[in-house]
Image (cartoon, rainbow, N blue to C red):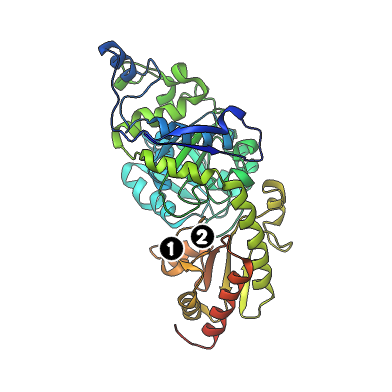
Amino acid sequence: MRRETIAVHSGFDCDPATRAVAVPIYQTAAYAFESADHGAALFNLEVEGYRYSRIANPTTTILETRVTELEGGAASVAVASGQAALHYALVNLADRGGNIVSTPQLYGTSHTLLSHVLPRQGIEGRFAESDSPEAIERLIDENTRAVFCESVGNPAGNICDIAGIAEAAHRHGVPLIVDNTVATPILLRPFEHGADIVVHSLTKFMGGHGTTMGGVVVDGGRFDWAAQRARFPMFSEPDASYHGLVYTERFGPAAYAARIRSVYQRTTGAVLAPLNAFLLLQGIETVALRVERHVENARRVAEFLKADPRIEWVSYAGFAESPYFELAQKYLRGTPPSLLTFGVAGGFETAKVFYDRLGLIKRLVNIGDVKSLACHPASTTHRQMTNDERAKAGVTPEMIRLCVGIEHVDDIIGDLDQALAGALAGKRP
């Protein structure tokens, strides 16, 4: 068993006891019981402990504790990927049917989950006309089980009015789920603005090195499930699969997270390997420092692109003319993340040539890596969507999504410059 010491410095108040501790890597499948009665108590959720790594693992628990603390929540469940986290977060509320109301600006696979996969499981995905609280509230009805948004849309770069959306959801007794992958808790903590549940793809900025898949669901611990018993009976009524256990009574503010672990992770098994949890913890150790460099480089790159006549437009919330400038001041302390989009003059084909000519900047669909990464969404991540769906998601044919890394900013700009020069001259690589 290997031990490493890691530390987290988030810029927020954290328990000093958890900032630097020895992290054991428990690479094991199962755990011995003290006795038959001890095993029974574990399986009945009567005592804390470990029985099988599909359900919980000590290394993963440390990761969950860290992320919970960074986000300011009550409990977390770490899983195999960000998409697994979102799936669990939604079905934990809607496994008896109903609908999920969402903003239209979503990551392509999240859109597919809501528009195609969940409907086959009896859960309707509803997409508002825009990300405004008013547009979202118009779709909420007695069958709505959650409202969902991305704090910063991928790839659209829109910034959601979390407080406004939360108020709209809460007026109808519905929780708000926020995907905070792009912003990270370093720039934004959604619970402070009324969100109830937060999800992350830990693969991205939190891990930071593009090596390790992982996701997490964070329970804010503030939504009153008992008060909304009619809509969410699964939390306040006895669970027959656990001999009548009632989650709100046994787990209190962490009832939502406990049900994900006990029902979904246990039975469907999107488990995060202990070694992956360790690697993600190593990434979280430097997340605050990396984000600082990411956002400064992104500002310089956005200014370069804005001044370049070979670029038709730049979507960056740090510009005063951006429709999201004020929301960036309110939610991101005036510091937009390093995800930005721009349009290459010449349209779809020129954008593809530009994309193919990139050298330092990697052609990947991932984001949040220390390396600068670019994507042409119309031909990759959002390819399966209709033209209308792409337009509502903010994806245009000439769009390039750029996630600015932590390389020297002059090298990043130099690569963009040479790729633009070649593309506009019609020179394929």
Q: Is residue 94 visible?
A: yes
Q: Position of residue 43 (x, y in %)?
A: 31, 20
Q: Residues within 10 Å of mark 1 (few under 14, many from 20)?
A: many
Report the disc number at residue 79. none
Do the residues under discs 2 and 1 have CB atoms within 8 angstroms? Answer: yes
| Left or right for 291, reference 239 | right
- For badge 1, the amino acid type reads His
Q: Is residue 231 visible?
A: no
- For badge 2, the amino acid type reads Ala
Report the disc number at residue 393. 2
Q: Position of residue 323 (x, y in %)?
A: 68, 59
Name the residue at 31% across, 46% down.
Answer: 120
Q: Which is more toward the observer, 301 or 389?
A: 301
Q: Position of residue 240 (x, y in %)?
A: 31, 20
Q: What is the quadrant of the N terminus in the image? A: top left
Instruction: Please name the residue that numbered disc 1 is placed on.
Output: 382
Name the residue at 38% across, 15% down.
Answer: 46
Which secondary structure lies at badge 1? Answer: loop
Classify 213 as above or below 70.
below
| Left or right for 229, reference 334 | left
| Left or right for 24, reference 32 | right
Name the residue at 52% across, 47% down.
Answer: 206
Which secondary structure lies at badge 2? Answer: loop
Q: Position of residue 62 (x, y in %)?
A: 47, 32
Which quadrant of the view contains residue 262? top left
